[in-house]
Amino acid sequence: MLTYSNDGKQRAVEDRVLKIFCDTNRVCELEDSVVEWYDGKYFQRQHELMDLSFFKPLFDVKEYMCAGVDGLISKIHLIAKEEGTLKCDYIGVPINIKPKR
């Protein structure tokens, strides 16, 4: 298991500290532990995939990647196409798209 520091600059690895050059606040430990991701269209249990149409008003879906054997783990790459707020019970929290600066 990987342990991430709170400062977002170092990651503990075994008995040493390794400097990494990314924002670890954006790294999901579950995502980081998955070795192989593949396009959702190749996922064998298609009935388990999420219908992404609720993203369409505010986002373009660039990529829907899947992993997992016993269960489905997904990561979705979205690109905002306009500002607004997406409220969806399926996600559980509102997503706010702010104006481009």
Image: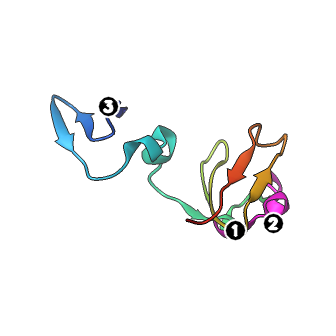
* Residue 25 percent coordinates (x, y): 43, 41
The image quadrant that residue 38 belongs to is bottom right
Q: Is residue 20 left or right of residue 62?
A: left
Region of the chain picked out in magenta, as a range: 47-64
Under mark 3, the amino acid is: Ser
Q: Is residue 58 magenta?
A: yes
Up-down relation of residue 35 to residue 25 (above or below): below
Q: Which of the labelled discs sits on residue 61, or is there none?
A: 1
Whether tag 2 and tag 1 are in contact, CB under 8 A, the answer is: yes
Q: Which of the labelled discs sits on residue 5, or is there none?
A: 3
Q: Residue furthest left?
A: 16
Under mark 2, the amino acid is: Lys
* Residue 95 percent coordinates (x, y): 71, 48
Query: Mark 2 sits on what residue?
Result: 56
User: At 67% from the left edge and 64% from the top edge, which residue is drawn?
Assistant: 40
Dot 1, how many residues are within 10 Å of its Cα: few (below 14), some (14-19), or many (20+)?
Answer: some
Q: Does residue 50 appear in this view?
A: yes
Which SS class for mark 1? strand
Which SS class for mark 3? loop
